[in-house]
Image (cartoon, grey):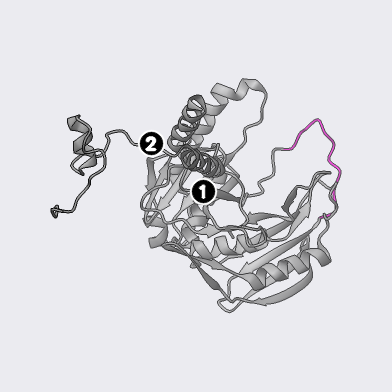
Amino acid sequence: MAIHEPGRRLMLSVPLKFVQKRVGGGGHRGVSASLNLTSMIDFLVVTVVFLLMTFSASGEIPVDKNVKLPKAENTVDMVDAPMISVNGSQVLVDGTAAGSTRAIEDAGRMQRIDELFNILKAKRELWRATQGGSGRPFPGVCILQVDQMVPALVVKSVFQTAAFAGYPNVSFMVGQLPRSDRPQ
Amino acid sequence: MIPMIDLLVCCIAFLLITAVWSHMARMNADAQVPGPPNPEKELNPQPPEKMLHVEMRQDDKFTLIWKQGPTVVNSIDVPRHAIEVEQGPVTAIRFPELAAKVSEEWKANGSHRDASDKKLDQAVLHTDNKTVFKEIIAVIDAIYTPKRDFGGASKQIPAFNVTFSVN
């Protein structure tokens, strides 16, 4: 009996070229692959659950890039109010320049920031003109976005200026620390 | 099956677009400015309530002072030991001893502890001009640590309302 070269034998007798090519080992992989639906749906459901858990209705709060906020544990949710940002020596109200704190630091004593006072007063008057007729009292809420290394002297000056301008309900914006008494 | 996968994909797309990755919050520190007097209402003089004054003017200690009007009721010193907590690029400061002492003091001397009481005890924070802002926040955070029930529901609110003193 003659000795043959080893190789595939099955179905080689089928007189079709694509069959012989496939059984001979020379075929290509199919262009369409099957997808495991169970694992795909699992993945989609887990992603939806994760995104729903991290969902926040209050939306993204713009934070000045130059401000490094301190973090705290016992906080409350943000509200829509004028945002006073203090970074280094600059004061901004809703992104608009509203004075400098350099004079306060140089003087070494608390003083009113006139530009900030005027802008906040204008905002309060605008609120009165647009919503004053509704009978609701003016909320007087503003949020201070202060860099964590700013000295108390500057914080007090900005705080007092805001109170003088009719915004006594001041809140400090902070990063959220995980609550130690709440299971994670 | 296809509509379900479509729904899931749409949900993911919507949630990804509206996702908020930086979680910001706020801490109240109102200025306690009294409103204008109402000329139509007769004023009834109220006895002053006890207030907790937290002094952070010294480097080594806090002083907790209970005052009723100008009268000092009690004064306690708490060592000022800051604990640094690494939170990503920011190091947060905590004062756990102060938080524990404030909770203890509120349990002993707080005037508004009943769940049906809508008023809060008042704390006033006094600081010197050099203290950095992150330490002020750490102290306010410590004062907000004691919680109490509010209303009939299982809602917990901070026992104190904090006022930031500019003096």
The answer to which image quadrant residue B38 occupies is top right
Q: Which residue is drawn at 50% across and 38% down?
A: A41
Q: Is the magenta stretch mostly helix, strand or loop?
A: loop
Instruction: Please say whether residue A117 is visible from this viewpoint.
Output: no
Amino acid on which disc 1 is placed? Met
Whether residue B43 appears in magenta in the rendering, the answer is yes
Considering only vertical position in the picture, is B58 above or below A95? below
**Residue A140 at x, y percent in the picture:** 60, 38
Image side of residue A19 versus residue A144, left or right:
left
Q: Residue furthest top?
A: A133
Residue lying at the far front in this picture: please name it: A1
Query: In the image, what residue occupies the spot 60% across and 64% down?
Result: B139
Q: Is mark 2 on a helix, strand or loop?
A: loop
Please state which amino acid type lies under the numbered disc 2. Ser
Is residue A90 or residue A20 the one in the foreground? A20
Q: Are marks 2 and 1 on the same chain?
A: no
Q: In which quarter of the image is the C terminus of chain B?
A: bottom right
Which chain letter matches label 2? A
Which segment did they paint magenta? B37-48
Question: Can see residue A18?
Answer: yes
Which numbered circle lies on residue A34?
Answer: 2
Q: Does the magenta stretch include residue A21?
A: no
Residue B54 circle label: none
**Which one is in front in this view, the residue at disc 2 or the one at disc 1?**
2
Element class at badge 1: strand
Instruction: Quote the CA–CA distance across marks 2 and 1.
Output: 44 Å
Q: Which of A7 and A151 is in front in this view?
A: A7
Q: Nearer the viewer, residue B149 or A55?
A: A55
For residue A123, above or below residue B73:
above
Where residue B87 appears, as percent x and y from the top left, is 48, 63
- The chain carrying label 1 is B
Q: Which residue lies under the disc numbered 1?
A: B24
